[in-house]
Amino acid sequence: LLLVAGPEPLLNKAKPYLSADDIHRLGRRIKELDVFGHPLSVHNPTGDDAFRDSDWTTYGVLQGPKTLDRKRLSAGLLKNHHEAKPLYAQETLWPGNKYHLPYTLDDIRKNAYVMILSGATINLGDMDGDSSSGFSGTMDLDRRVQARHDILKAVWDFFETVPYHRMKPRPDLVDNGYCLAEPGRQYLVYLDRPGAVILRRTAGTCKVQWINPRDTREVRDGGTMTGGQPLASPPEGDWLLYLTRTDAGA
C-alpha cells in the first residue's frame, strides 16, 4: 500500500510539511509512473479524509474516529467511504496505544463488527504505550497480547462464512444497529446490545437467524418473516441478525 508523504503531511494545519497542492501533484505523478498499479492514498491525520474524492487515490485512510460510541464510529466511517474505493481504518482500533481509549476485549469485538459493517478494513494495533511499543511497535512475539489477535481473527473468520463481498453498508434499511445488505437477497445486522430491529426491505420471505458474535458457532433459529415486524434479539449480549431470502424474487 503506497502513501504519499506519510505520516500525516497535513497534521500541522498552520505549517504542513507538504501542501495539499503538492500532495495532489505527487499523487498524480506516482500514479502515472507506477506500472504495477499499487493502491495509493495519503496518511491522513485524525478527522475526515481530505483526499476522499481525489482522482488519483484508490483507497481511503482514516485515523478514527477513536471512540467507544459505536454510532459515532459508524457515522464517521460511512461519511468518509467513497462508493468506488476501499476504506482502510488504519489508526482506528489500536488497543494499548496511549492516544486511544482503554478498550476492553468486548470493546475490541464490538468496534470491529461495527467497523466492518460500516465498510472499513481494519488495521489492528497491539501496543503498550506509543505507536512504537508493544507487539505492533517491535514485532517481538513475547510482547503480544494474544487475546486481542484472537478476537479480531474470530471476527474476520466469521465474515469468511458469508458473501460479504456482495453486500454494502445500508444504515437506511434499519431502525437500529448496523446493516450490510444485498437488497432483496440477504441482510446482516449487528446489534451491540440486546434489542429489536425493524428491517425496511422489499417484500418476500426471509429465513431469520440470530448468531452469537462472542461464539459464532452458536446460531439460533428465528423462523421466517414476511413483513416489516420488529425482530427482537436474545436477551443477553450483542447479536448478529442474518436474514436470507427464501422465496423467488428480486
Image (tube, helix red, strand yellow):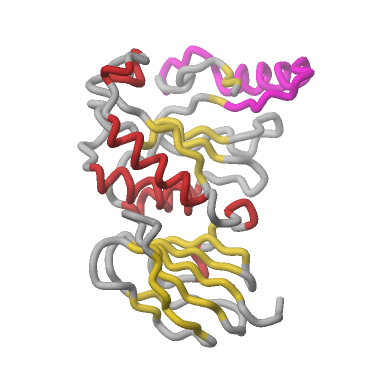
Q: Position of residue 92 (x, y in %)?
A: 38, 36
The residue at the point 77 percent across, 15 percent down is: 33
Number of residue marks: 0
Q: Can residue 1 be seen at all in this image of the molecule?
A: yes
Residue 78, position as x, y percentages in the image? 50, 51
Confirm whether the magenta stretch covers residue 37: yes
Q: Can you give x and y, in whole percent of width and height, for residue 21 in the image?
A: 62, 21
Q: Quadrant of the C terminus?
A: bottom right
For image coordinates 47% across by 51% down, the residue present is 158
Q: Is residue 250 above or below residue 25?
A: below
Which residue is at a point 48% across and 67% down the rendered structure image? 242
The one nearer the camera, 147 or 226, is 147
- Residue 245 as seen in the image, left or right of residue 131: right
Quarter of the image with the N terminus in it: top right
- The picture quadrant where one finds residue 12 is top left
Residue 128 appears left or right of 90: left
Q: Is residue 119 magenta?
A: no
- Height in image: 120 above or below 60? below
Question: Magenta part of the protein: which range?
Answer: 13-41
Q: Residue at x 22, y 42 (%)?
A: 104
Q: Considering depth in this image, is 193 or 213 the residue closer to the camera?
A: 213
Q: Is residue 105 above or below residue 43?
A: below
Measured from the top left, where is residue 57 in percent x and y? Answer: 65, 31
